[in-house]
Image: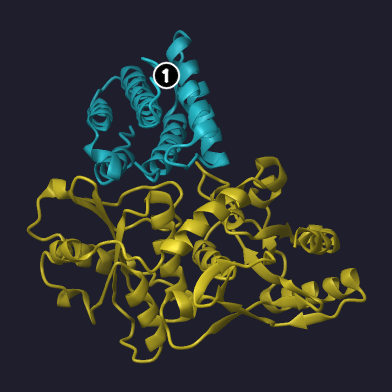
């Protein structure tokens, strides 16, 4: 059984140590990854992976949504109340955050994360293997790492 | 190469660094997917302040030192420029030569210390390092350009194009000396009227970045007369053991993308095009087979399998058009 402890702890350290850490909404994202870490203790495999996908998806959705909200507010625009992962990505690639955008491979990673998430959250009795979760986490770590390098 | 018996010394050394520290204040064995070598420790002493620590034990040579420099660059680029990067080095054996190599590490890492042996590190030394280490300004322009150039270079990456290079069944076929002779022979046949230059030297910006007193050059396996912006390197590679060589090649390409004008670092107006001819495969780990391919392309290497060398004349012409 894989708990992905190293991956999750790395995301937590990267977020806590980033210039974005002081933002209240990013603190919520950090809490979401704490929930992900705890989900690793769930003994039933199908429940465990469902929770892991659920928490990882909410975390990246919220983080990218917050980056968009922060940027729009900075430029005096009213951000939407909620931004989907796809919409946040499109916004970031079009407008940038502090002048920076995701690199092409990471933008592709985020699109894949979105597709995987949709598959496993919306299709009945469908669960990812540990290998798929590892790839899913690799992609989210890459996205979060690149996002933490955006100027605040 | 980093010592192969690293397990035992590293465990003892890292345990000494974190002795007496709160378990929640650091992470051992962190995992960042895009780093070719992971830091040995991560710590966040205060929100917004991240420090990554690397512990090395190796024979000092430009290969090993530039491999460490690559760890510094990758951490700053992929984890963030705000990250302070500290390094500890236990030279094996204690060497007094290569003073400029040590000075390079001293002047680029945010904190750098050497110890003769692991037991020389004071218990809980991590705390002092974290208090001292803050990101240095010396790499600011370089990292800014690297981030930009990496994004541009990665547009060329496509899994389909490079799939054969990550096939683990593809083994290197020629031993080192024969490989070099074979490539030499093929180059002369393919490029005909161009003169093939062996072991050309290309000036790099290592001395400038490391605030060293002299200027340095990198040697390549082959150059092509009349194409000073193209150089070729040949690599035998298999599923295992290629990472150290790749870390060195990464820094080699990065340090050749720039020139110094009026004591300022600037990207070369004519892009330098390093070409890597691979005999074998450069597959990454199973969950990310393209890791090494992506990394090399991100710093400007054009990758070519040994069985597609007929592409070389076109690539060299393309280099002319690009510049």
Does residue B292 appear left or right of residue B57 in this picture? right
| Residue projecting furthest to the top | A124
| Residue B229 percent across, percent down from the top left | 72, 71
Q: Is residue B168 something that shows in the picture?
A: no
Q: Image height check: is A120 above or below B157?
A: above
| Residue projecting furthest to the left | B20
Between A103 and B200, the residue placed more toward the observer is A103
* Residue that badge 1 annotates: A83
Q: Residue at x 17, y 63 (%)?
A: B126
Does residue A12 appear left or right of residue A92 in this picture? left
How many other residues sit within 10 Å of disc 1, few (<14), some (14-19) or many (≥20)? Answer: some
Q: Colour of chain A?
A: cyan
| Residue projecting furthest to the bottom | B96
| Residue B124 percent across, percent down from the top left | 11, 64
Badge 1 marks a residue whose secondary structure is loop
Q: Quadrant of residue B72?
A: bottom left
The quadrant of the rendering that contains the N terminus of chain B is bottom left
Q: Image height check: is A34 above or below B98?
A: above
Does residue B218 appear left or right of residue B51 in this picture? right
Q: Which chain is yellow?
A: B
The quadrant of the rendering that contains the C terminus of chain B is bottom right
């Amino acid at each position: 059984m894989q708990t992905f402890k190293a991956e999750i702890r790395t995301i937590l350290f990267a977020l806590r140590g980033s210039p974005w850490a002081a933002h209240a909404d990013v603190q919520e994202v950090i809490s979401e990854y704490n929930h992900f870490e705890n989900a690793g203790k769930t003994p039933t495999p199908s429940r465990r992976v469902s929770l892991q996908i659920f928490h990882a998806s909410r975390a990246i959705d919220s983080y990218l949504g917050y980056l968009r909200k922060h940027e729009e507010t900075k430029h005096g625009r009213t951000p939407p109340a909620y931004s989907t992962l796809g919409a946040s990505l499109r916004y970031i690639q079009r407008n940038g955050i502090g002048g920076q955008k995701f690199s092409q491979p990471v933008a592709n990673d985020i699109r894949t994360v979105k597709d995987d998430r949709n598959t496993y959250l919306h299709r009945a009795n469908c669960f990812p293997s540990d290998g798929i979760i590892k790839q899913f986490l690799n992609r989210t770590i890459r996205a979060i790492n690149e996002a933490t390098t955006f100027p605040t | 190469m980093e010592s192969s018996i690293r397990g035992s010394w590293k465990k003892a050394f890292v345990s000494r660094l974190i002795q007496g520290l709160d378990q929640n204040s650091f992470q051992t064995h962190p995992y960042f997917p895009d780093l070719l070598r992971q830091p040995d420790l991560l710590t966040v002493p205060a929100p917004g302040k991240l420090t990554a620590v690397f512990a090395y034990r190796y024979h000092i040579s430009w290969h090993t030192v530039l491999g460490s420099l690559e760890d510094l660059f990758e951490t700053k680029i992929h984890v963030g420029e705000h990250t302070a990067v500290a390094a500890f080095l236990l030279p094996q054996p204690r060497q007094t030569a290569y003073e400029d190599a040590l000075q390079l590490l001293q002047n680029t890492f945010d904190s750098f210390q050497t110890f003769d042996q692991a037991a020389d590190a004071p218990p809980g030394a991590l705390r002092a390092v974290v208090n001292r280490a803050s990101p240095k300004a010396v790499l600011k322009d370089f990292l800014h350009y690297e981030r930009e150039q990496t994004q541009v270079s990665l547009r060329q990456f496509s899994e389909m194009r490079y799939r054969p290079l990550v096939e683990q069944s593809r083994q290197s076929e020629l031993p080192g000396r024969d490989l070099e002779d074979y490539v030499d022979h093929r180059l002369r046949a393919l490029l005909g009227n161009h003169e093939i230059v062996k072991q050309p030297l290309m000036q790099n910006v290592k001395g400038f970045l490391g605030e060293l007193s002299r200027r340095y050059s990198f040697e390549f396996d082959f150059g092509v007369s009349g194409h000073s912006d193209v150089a070729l390197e040949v690599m035998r590679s298999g599923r295992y053991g290629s990472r150290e060589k790749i870390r060195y090649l990464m820094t080699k390409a990065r340090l050749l993308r720039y020139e110094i004008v009026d004591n300022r670092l600037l990207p070369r107006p004519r892009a330098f095009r390093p070409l890597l001819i691979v005999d074998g495969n450069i597959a990454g780990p199973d969950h990310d087979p393209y890791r090494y391919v992506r990394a090399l392309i991100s710093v400007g290497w054009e990758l070519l399998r040994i069985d597609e060398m007929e592409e070389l004349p076109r690539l060299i012409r393309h280099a002319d058009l690009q510049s």
